[in-house]
Amino acid sequence: MLGIGLSMTGGTAQGRWSPPAALIDLDFRQDRYLQAGAAKSFDDIFAYNGAGLRTFTSEAGTHVWAAHNLLAHSGDLAQGTAVAASATKTRLTAAAGTGTTVPEARRAGVTLPDAGTYTYSAHVRQVNLRYLAMTSAGYGSGAGGVTLFDLQGGTIATQGAGHLALVKPLADGSCICSITFTADGSALNGTLSAGMSDNAVSHAVTGPDGTEALDVFAQWVCRSDLGGMADNPDNALGAEFASYVPAEAAPVFKARRNAYVHGALEGILIEDEAAVNIVEQSHDFAAAYWVKNNQLAVAASGTIAGIPAWELTDSSATGFAHCAAGIGAIAGVHTASCLVRKNPSQTSLFSARLSVGSNQFCGISFDTVTGAIKDHWNSGLAVQPDGTKMRDVIDMGTHWFAWFTYDPSLLTGLNATADVQVFPAHDALNLSPGAQVTGSHVCTAFQVTAGYTPGSFIPTAGRAASRPAETLAIRSSVLPATMPVAVSLALEGCMNFADTGSGAAARFFDWRADSGNHLSAGLNTAGTATGQIQVFSAHSGAASTASGAASAFAPGLNVPVSFAARHPAAQLELAAKGETAAGSPAPSALPDLAAAGIGLAPAFNGSLGRFRLWDRDLGSAGIGRIPA
């Protein structure tokens, strides 16, 4: 804690201190952003780039999708194709004709990223015809139905095949209507439409005279499996529109704000690197992808953190019982993880491992009552410089989060084809895989991704799936137009990191005009350092570095981190874990960064809680006493 206030020379700061108001105060936990004391929106302050779907943990402890809209031009009907009709921005009008027509606003080529469950919604109002027809087509078997809504009664008239329909009548006489369907992955580029009908059983208008019309104010598409999609944190239209994210020329993907860790609100979740889950069926053990050997797989009651789970039961008391899935050749360090429901009724182990090459195993085995890890299957297990094995079991309340990191360079047969193997019941007294006891465990969310630490869950359903990289930056327009004579900064959050011997395990912020003029902070794990905060300054190429204690932070998951720094013209100083450290050599000047934005968490896996910037020097005692 910075509030301790001990300096490296042994000085003591007196009590806790409330610093002056910061020029920029970005409180991600409260989702509140201030510039010179004035409240600003997230988009006013930040440039966020994170195209693609990603998950995080909600207040309820379930995995949810970050707010998004996969349908471009969400508020403009004219951007689609009007069939048997004409369209303005918000009104669809049937074309006059004889016989039966199907007037609709059609959106062709709407691409879904992966197999899964999706919801298509429309905010509509009846003009003269009573019924709204919503369709989905081209997304595989069972996703091609037609649902009709009674806009006058605010009810579902006919629910289409493969659809789950919902209607919300609003006080102004309009309705929000939606259809939820499952894309099986065989086809991901399809067509969605909203149209009008004169009857409750089919999408049709007989003999339209050209006056029939329907108002469609907005349309949106979101992924809705797992725990659903998180509410749009920027929604200003009322609670009924919590799932609506306005989109213009392209789909919109919001940052993962209001993210929770172990039940605590931690702010904004940032993972700078893209990731791919190479386990092709992350949470469906009934799929043929998982080969059951003396195992039964039955859908479990409930979920684990919002993810469908499976109960795996040994069908033989003596046979070698496990499930296995081939994941091909693994090049480079990878981390495997899964969720396992607590099992107080029995003391058998739950085990997960990689089988690589000829009888070489890397994995984790633990007691599902206590979480105690059994020390075996260490071949290929990544190890930190101090000898700590890179695996752990974390108590998540109702379930365990188990993970281990695999380094193929430690095994013979480098890049050999690997299998994920799961042993849902295991004799606690005999670690041999062949020594089975009859029993069962409930598990889900199997994931193998590149890198030394686990990341957010990437669901898969028949093929590998990815999570794109993301970036967050403070816009230069909200920073001082002229560089102050001194600045002070403070950051707090929690991070996932491993001691890999790298000199740059993380970067917290980067305020950079060019390679010779910048102010930044990072995490060092090189040499004897296991988690050392460093602040770097460069002015016209002359560099200065302030380094905190070499072991200030221990490697792990969700490690709390906080520090502050000050930089008047000829000084650079860091405060972390109650200690202060001066820059060496002393800087020649404060770099001029007035025209540059600040990249936040440019190399980071974790949550940012708060970032503050002062256009003044808070002094050595000041930065050492900032509550964090």
Image: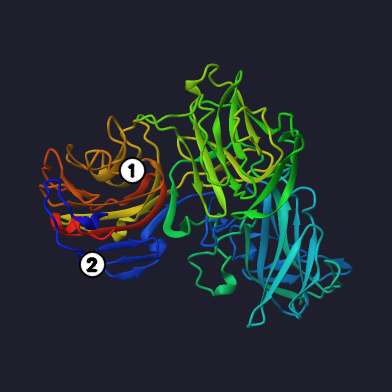
Residue 135 versus residue 454 in the image, above or below: below
Look at the image and tell me whether residue 605 can be seen.
yes
Look at the image and tell me whether residue 617 can be seen.
no
Q: Is residue 302 left or right of residue 451?
A: right
Q: Is residue 378 left or right of residue 35?
A: right
Residue at (30, 63) in percent of width and height: 25
Q: Is residue 176 left or right of residue 565?
A: right
Instruction: Give the image location of residue 537, x and y in percent.
Output: 20, 43
> In the current view of this chain or complex, which residue is farthest to the right?
99
Quarter of the image with the N terminus in it: bottom left
Mark 1 / mark 2, whichever is N-terminal: 2
| Marks 1/2: CA–CA distance | 25 Å
In the picture, the disc for residue 507 is: 1
Instruction: Give the image location of residue 83, x and y in percent.
Output: 75, 62
Instruction: Give the image location of residue 475, x and y in percent.
Output: 34, 56
Residue at (53, 16) in percent of width and height: 412
Residue 154 versus residue 318 in the image, above or below: below
The kind of secondary structure element at disc 1 is: strand
Is label 1 in contact with label 2 (beta carbons under 8 Å)?
no
Quarter of the image with the C terminus in it: bottom left
In the picture, the disc for residue 559 is: none
Q: Amino acid at mark 2?
A: Ala
